[in-house]
Image: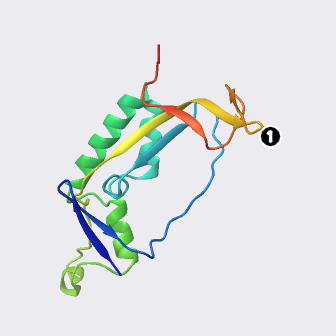
Amino acid sequence: MIELFFEDCCFLILIPSVIYQVCSVNLMEGDIIVSGSDGFFDNIFDQEILSIISESPGVDEAAKTLAELARKHSVDVTFDSPYSMEARSRGFDVPWWKKLLGAKLIGGKMDDITVVVAQVKTVAVPDDEDGDIEQKGDEQGSAAAVASAEENEG
């Protein structure tokens, strides 16, 4: 049974058989985490993300640059986006008569674009004996990490 709720101008859809995945990732101080909406990942390739992250002086600049590039790609009708490539691989394409003329499904996907870039500042490693958390600066730890959107905290 699907339930609909209206709350503060937003519709919430609750579906009992939601599929989700939980995983753990070992993090180290200095690791960069990039999280985004489907509108972000539908319009930007992994290699572009890596390139921008490596060229940016900080996480704020990286997030802004990534969001701007994804927006630019989303409105570019000539860009062969990750979205259009995936759609073609699943059998979605232009009508057969356009294919005869050499056309193919191509272009970005206009959608909301959200991207968060964070850098791990401190890794929290649980102490085996009593469950206390010990702060480590440069040792590998669990996924429980403190991430900051600011590169230099005072």
Q: How is the image coloured?
A: rainbow
Count residues near mark 1 (Cα–Cα under 10 Å), then give few for <14, some for 14-19, many for 20+.
Answer: few
Residue nearer the viewer, 104 or 112? 112
The quadrant holding residue 99 is: bottom left
| Residue 126 position (above or below residue 76) | above
The quadrant holding residue 127 is: top right
| Residue 33 position (above or below residue 77) | above
Residue 37: percent from the left, percent from the top? 35, 53
Asked which secondary structure carries label 1, the reply is loop
Q: Which residue is mark 1?
A: 128
Where's the N terminus, which quadrant? bottom left
Q: Is residue 29 visible?
A: no
Q: Viewed as shown, does residue 153 lie left or right of 140?
A: left
| Residue 85 position (above or below residue 75) | below
Residue 84: percent from the left, percent from the top? 32, 67
Q: Is residue 88 visible?
A: yes
Residue 151: percent from the left, percent from the top? 46, 23
Three-letter code for the amino acid on which mark 1 is drawn: Asp
* Residue at 33% over, 59% down: 81
Residue nearer the viewer, 99 or 19? 19
Residue 40: percent from the left, percent from the top? 34, 52
* Residue at 44% over, 31% down: 55
| Residue 135 position (above or below residue 110) | above
